[in-house]
Amino acid sequence: MKELLARLIEAFGPSGREDAVRAVLGAELQGMGLSAVADPMGNLVAVRPGRAGGARILLAAHMDEIGLIVTHVDANGFARFAAVGGISAQTALGQRVRFADGTVGTIGVERLDDPKDLKLDKLFIDCGGPRAAVRTGEMCVMAGGLQADGGRWIGKAMDDRVGCLVLLEAARALRDSPHEVHFAFTVQEEVGLRGARTAGYTADPELALAIDVTATGDTPKARTMDVALGGGAAVKVRDNSLLAHPYVIDWLRGAAERRAIPHQMEVLEYGGTDAGAIHTVRAGVRSGAVSIPCRYVHTPGEMVDAGDVQACVDLLVEALSAPLP
Amino acid sequence: MSSSDACIDLVQRLSDLPGVGGDEGAVRDHLWSVVSPHVEAARIDALGSLIVRRGRGGCKVLVDAHMDEVGLLVQQVEKDGWLRFQTVGGIDPRVLPGAVVRVGAAAVPGVIGWKPIHLQTEDDRKRVVPVKDLAIDIGAGGREQAERAVIPGDYAVFATQSGFFGDGLVRGKALDDRVGCALLATALDEAYGCEVHGVFAVQEEIGLRGAGAAAHAVAPDLALALEGTTCADLPGVDEHEQGSRLGGGPVLRIMDGGMIHDRRVNGLLVAAADQAGIPVQWKGTITGGTDAGRIHTTRGGIPSATLSVPCRYIHSPCAIASRADITHALDLLRGFLRTVAQRGFSA
């Protein structure tokens, strides 16, 4: 899993530019005999046929990562930028960034009279040359790969490449299921759950799950939250985009308890996931989420626990292997 | 009159009509009188958008322009005859005091009142007067007299008369987005060899409400929104915060607050511009959004882009656009539709 996660994390994929991630996932799916199709938005969807008595279930993990977009390049080659998804000026300052063609830059700042003036529009990307190396409209992402020496894995874009990994591994491990399962790797989650909305419409599922990272409350003076790294798969109860359907919560908890899969309940007081967009498409879809606990979300140092990742895979496989309750 | 002169003339006629979100009837009627000789099918949908079709078969392309403008809505007639109002769409309250407006279907003249500078306290001068403290004065002696002319629920628009301006410019209160409406209405005078669905949408300024329903009904292969867009090429604004430049040509975008533009649709626009030698500029800021933001996530996803005309001072009593930009945008729209017809499009 580690080697595949490293490839997923290193693939360039800010919102709307998920091509490289889609290529990695498409090859993996093909390798397990699932043919995947890209829809008009760019979502990659593989369908595993079901049989009578099964339900149509949509599972969604997003391919895109947060990034930056160049808005203006001045005569000296310094590039102004805006955020693609939730990147704060505090997080961006001093980071190394990488463009699709491999160009690397660093983020500098204007002279500030007051640290409170640190806003994105005071920052710029410096690619080192006197001439512009990049053009308006090009996107870049935080540079960096996977560090995974022990049971804790650190890397940029863990949100949500680790979710993509969980979804892939669940697809690989799922032996017998009555359900027609749509494995959707979605685009543009970080800019407003946009890919999931259209994937949800096309799949027209009876039940849907997002597979995404969630925050934890186990670091010094963290915001109170009963999710801990290493505490197992997180079963979402709420975030700002979704109140998970009680039926879905019970379904997931039942599966976890049946096989003693480590799990914890996730009450997230902010943020949202693909399920937030999916649950209101068409006439409504019973939806929830299986979340991978992750510290330092939306920084280049996102950290997950290998055991939690395995628990999420196990939970999905167990839940999908039996008819719905 | 050349096609581009006719388009610029139509921009001005449309800009002078009242059409705040929810009250687009006058604009719709005028557009219908312009496009009806050229279209093969037409309907007004449940929300009020005018949807027309020219051509049948081949690639199905939706072209959207919104009919509504930002404006005011009378909320209450006070006992002294003043009209309390809400804004409909995003209006900077700093542009309101002193503005001349026309209220209701009878276009009753009014002025937005506030204390004259002589009577203002120091605090008054430092603060932005909130909309709730402003009122429209229609010169009525009291509530009874005022209510003979205006009732709560009447809309008000800025009273600006459109016209030519400076060197090759045009001014008007509602260039956002009557310039888009005029481009679309004018371009429908030609058959392109693809199936063009023109959507004159309602209620863009208050949340892209009309466009989604229209796109759901049309279910096109691709979509293009036509817009008047922000342009802050003004003294004291840093180059990287200007957005676009007046006279720099039609504006294309990579990303805005509502969407990341489809690269294939942008590619068709660029190809059409290159072929005809039309200058284009890429929007340098990413705030704001257009109907395309709603359209592109409709149904199973509709690849979409926007084509905009730079307008200084949009969402104020008087916006300004360049006649050359409008002419280039019209040429680019026609070129885009021809390119779609020639190359086709499949998502």
Image (tube, rainbow, N blue to C red):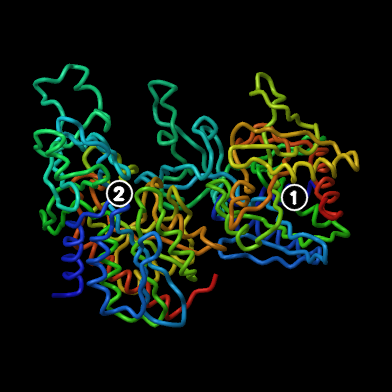
Q: Residue at x 25, y 52 (%)?
A: B311
Q: Which percent across, then down, holds residue A72?
A: 38, 47
**Residue identified by numbered label 2:** B230
Q: Secondary structure at mark 1?
A: helix
How packed mark 2 is, by other alpha carbons closer than 10 Å (few <14, some 14-19, many 20 or more), is many
Of all chains, the one bearing label 2 is B
Tell me if I can see residue B273 in this picture: yes
User: Please, which residue is most extreme toward the top here?
Assistant: B122
Q: Residue at x 51, y 32 (%)?
A: A93
Q: Is residue B267 left or right of residue A306?
A: left
- Verify CB contact (< 8 Å) between mark 1 and mark 2: no
Tell me if I can see residue A72 in this picture: no
The kind of residue tagged 1 is: Leu
Q: Residue at x 40, y 49 (%)?
A: B207
Q: Which percent across, then down, holds residue A238?
A: 66, 37
**Above or below, comparing residue A218 to residue B139 in the picture:** above
Q: Residue at x 19, y 53 (%)?
A: B105
The kind of residue tagged 2 is: Thr
On residue B1, the disc is: none
User: Please, which residue is most extreme toward the front here?
Assistant: B144
Q: Is residue B268 left or right of residue A246?
A: left
Q: Which percent across, then down, holds residue B189?
A: 27, 78
Closer to the camera, B160 or A36? B160
Q: Which percent across, then down, holds residue B101?
A: 16, 44
- The span from disc 1 to disc 2 (Cα, nearest Å) is 42 Å
Closer to the camera, B28 or A110? B28
Closer to the camera, B309 or A248? A248
Of all chains, the one bearing label 1 is A
**Above or below, comparing residue A133 to residue B180 in the picture:** above
**Residue identified by numbered label 1:** A165
Quadrant of the rendered image containing residue A252:
top right
